[in-house]
Image (spheres, helix red, strand yellow):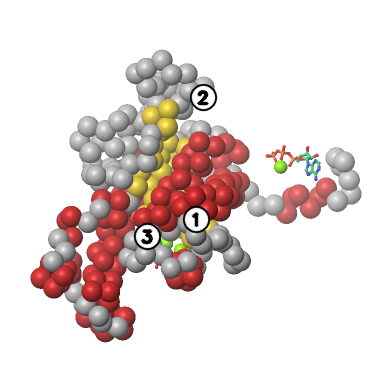
Amino acid sequence: MANSKYEYVRSFEQADILLPNTFIVVRIDGRGFTKFTTKYKFVKPNDRRALDLMNAAAEAVMKDLPDLVLAYGQSDEFSFVFHKDCMLFERRASKLTTTIVSTFTANYVLGWSKYFPDTPLTPPLPSFDGRAVCYPSDTNLRDYLSWRQVDCHINNLYNTSFWALVQQGGMDPRAAEQELSGTFSADKNEILFSRFGINYNNEPEIFKKGSVLYRDFFPTSTQSSPTFSKTKQSSTPPLSQPKPKRIARPMSQPLGRSTYPDLLRDS
Ligand code: ATP
Ligand code: ATP
Ligand code: MG
Ligand code: MG
Ligand code: MG
Ligand code: MG
């Protein structure tokens, strides 16, 4: 099999080894989920079943890939963080990304009937795209996660206001969109409160802030395998907790250092 006359075509492959000693973040995002959520009549603005399914699929990915230390999800996206000295697939971007995307998608489809027992999946089936990006410092990684969480907040405030105007205010979508155009956060909070009696602060945390999954390393008990935290419907922003859990290297991996950079510390 080796050294056939066709072997040369391998040299056409492009190297895509990611920079060493950097966090690798793979973000996946549902393809055409605006349409998909309409097809399956997702509760708007937030279908809790769909978020739970996203979290279940992400948990399966983290269980499958011990090099992952953290994941953050909101809407139809999830960001997976590999630790800095991860050497999985020699850090090849395409291998890391496609493995995460396909593992996530497979588990999303497998889990569908548990969360949507009354609506079977039919083609076109859900699919996800993915990309890998390197972040060299703790601050860069924190800022990345903050960026995604701010996106969650801004979209959720908008969507909550939009759907209140449509569902409770009886507006047609166009008028609701116009009503909200040019408004600031304070205006949307005011619309929600004065017109619909909704205090945005009391909306579920999982809607406002998204979900964090993290690996619990070196637990205090005598467990022999890495424990895996339950999905957090983060009650506080994931990256600004004053006393975070320390994130350490998976126990299934040989250790180069005994600790792992503390991603959650306020800088
Ligand atoms: P693309 O393929 O470019 O990502 P998209 O239609 O998926 O296109 P996104 O920006 O990813 O565009 O938007 C995701 C859409 O899915 C949004 O409209 C969002 O409101 C909707 N959505 C995602 N999760 C939920 C949920 N749990 N409940 C209700 N709607 C959701
Ligand atoms: P990697 O993750 O590196 O790809 P791998 O175990 O998948 O590891 P491959 O080189 O891709 O390694 O080999 C695929 C394996 O699956 C081979 O052992 C092959 O014989 C087996 N396999 C694939 N398709 C079939 C099939 N239809 N019937 C029987 N065996 C199969
Ligand atoms: Mg996209
Ligand atoms: Mg999408
Ligand atoms: Mg999206
Ligand atoms: Mg193979």
Q: Residues within 10 Å of mark 2 (few under 14, many from 20)?
A: few
Query: Is 35 placed above or below 24 here?
Result: below
Tell me, yes or no, if residue 142 can be seen here: no
The amino acid type, in three-letter code, at marker 1 is Pro
Q: Nearer the viewer, residue 109 or 155?
A: 109
* Residue 117 marker: 1
Residue at 57%, 36% (x, y): give it. 88
Q: Nearer the viewer, residue 252 or 46?
A: 46
- The residue under label 3 is 47
113 versus 38 height, above or below: above
Q: Residues within 10 Å of mark 3 (few under 14, many from 20)?
A: some
- Tell me what residue is drawn at x 87 percent, y 41 percent: 1
Query: Alpha carbon of mark 2 to alpha carbon of mark 3: how far?
Result: 36 Å
Tag in front: 1 or 3: 1
* Viewer-closest of 131 and 220: 220
Task: Specify whether tag 2 is near ligand 2 (CB below 8 Å).
Answer: no
Q: CA distance from mark 1 to mark 3?
A: 14 Å
**Viewer can see residue 118:** yes
Label 2: which secondary element = loop
- Mark closest to the chain's N terminus, 1 or 3: 3
Q: Residue 221 is drawn in which quadrant?
A: top left
Q: Nearer the viewer, residue 212 or 182?
A: 212
> Where is mark 2, residue-wise?
252
Residue type at tag 3: Asp
Residue 136, given in percent of the width and then of the height, sits at 40, 42
Q: Of the residues under marks 1 and 2, which one precedes in the sequence? A: 1
Q: Is mark 3 within 8 Å of ligand 1?
A: yes
Question: In this view, which residue lies farthest toward the front?
Answer: 118
Q: Secondary structure at mark 1?
A: loop
The picture quadrant for ligand 6 comes to: top right
Q: Position of residue 208 (x, y in %)?
A: 26, 55
